[in-house]
Image: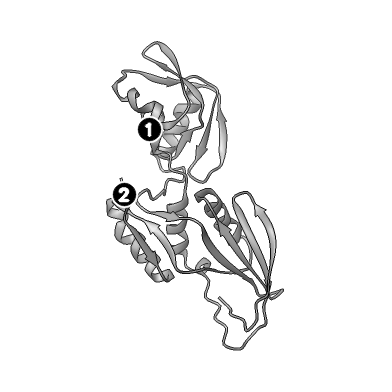
Amino acid sequence: MKTSLRIPILLLGVCLSLVSCQKEALRITDNQQDDSFLDDANLVGLVQGVTAHDGSHDNVVDDSNCFSINFPYYCNVDGEVFLYQQASDLEGLYLADEVTPVFPITVTYADYNETQINNEAEFQALIAQCASGELYNNAIRCVDFIYPIEVAIYDPVTADFETLVYDHDRATFNGVVSLLDADLIAQFRYPLTVDIRDGETIQISSDSELKAIINSNLNFCE
């Protein structure tokens, strides 16, 4: 990230849902670095995997990690209809012989897009798409960011500097997607903390360390 001798901060308030931002003016210096994590496709993919929507909590209903059904919804369970309002309500379904959601339902994909499913044929087609690899299914479930995290953004055209503060996986995932569409330089503000298996937390101090920690834990993902 390009640095500055003076960075007066002007608080702008909330820029996006679950995202706050600060806008700053940069004084350009000759020794500024312009490394951007957006230029590292492997790191971008890992960050998106960590922050992708985890659709595995309702596999007993939809048999798919690529999406989950939005609560609340009804299911026909062995001939009886029940209302389900949260993930913990689904635990008893693993003992059932037949579980079918009552349509229409709305599903959320791993990339946080949503769509309505109107019948069993559409539902089974979606499950088949996930099984064949047609849907994004790169969620990394063994590493989590401890929020908030900050991303410093530099616009080389306007010489403006902005700090985005993300408070949730959805905001981080969508924020990275938005940044990829813009000609900006972006850097994580370290240190940041991640939660790995068994609740262990690790403080990260660089992009290379972040990649190493995520990659070293991939074998422990379900």
The answer to which image quadrant residue 213 occupies is: bottom left
For the point 51% across and 46% down, the residue is 111
For the point 57% across and 56% down, the residue is 175
For the point 43% across and 55% down, the residue is 145
The answer to which image quadrant residue 33 occupies is: bottom right
Which comes before the other along the chain, label 2 or label 1?
A: 1
Q: Is residue 142 above or below residue 25?
A: above
Identified by mark 2, the residue type is Cys
28 horizontally vs 149: left or right = right
Under circle 2, the secondary element is loop
Identified by mark 1, the residue type is Asn
For the point 59% across and 50% down, the residue is 18
Q: How many marks?
A: 2
Gap in angstroms between the C-alphas marked 2 and 1: 16 Å
Label 1: how many Cα within 10 Å (few below 14, some 14–19, many 20+): some
Q: Are marks 2 and 1 in contact (CB under 8 Å)?
A: no
Q: Position of residue 168 (x, y in %)?
A: 52, 50
Under circle 1, the secondary element is helix
The image quadrant where one finds the N terminus is: bottom right
Residue at image mark 1:
59
Q: Is residue 79 above or below residue 7?
A: above
Label 2: how many Cα within 10 Å (few below 14, some 14–19, many 20+): few
Q: Is residue 102 above or below residue 17?
A: above
Spot the residue most to the bottom. 30
Q: Is residue 146 above or below residue 65?
A: below
Q: Position of residue 112 (x, y in %)?
A: 53, 43
27 horizontally vs 198: left or right = right
140 horizontally vs 21: left or right = left
Q: Position of residue 156 (x, y in %)?
A: 66, 75
Front-most of residues 122 and 191: 191
Residue at image mark 2:
221
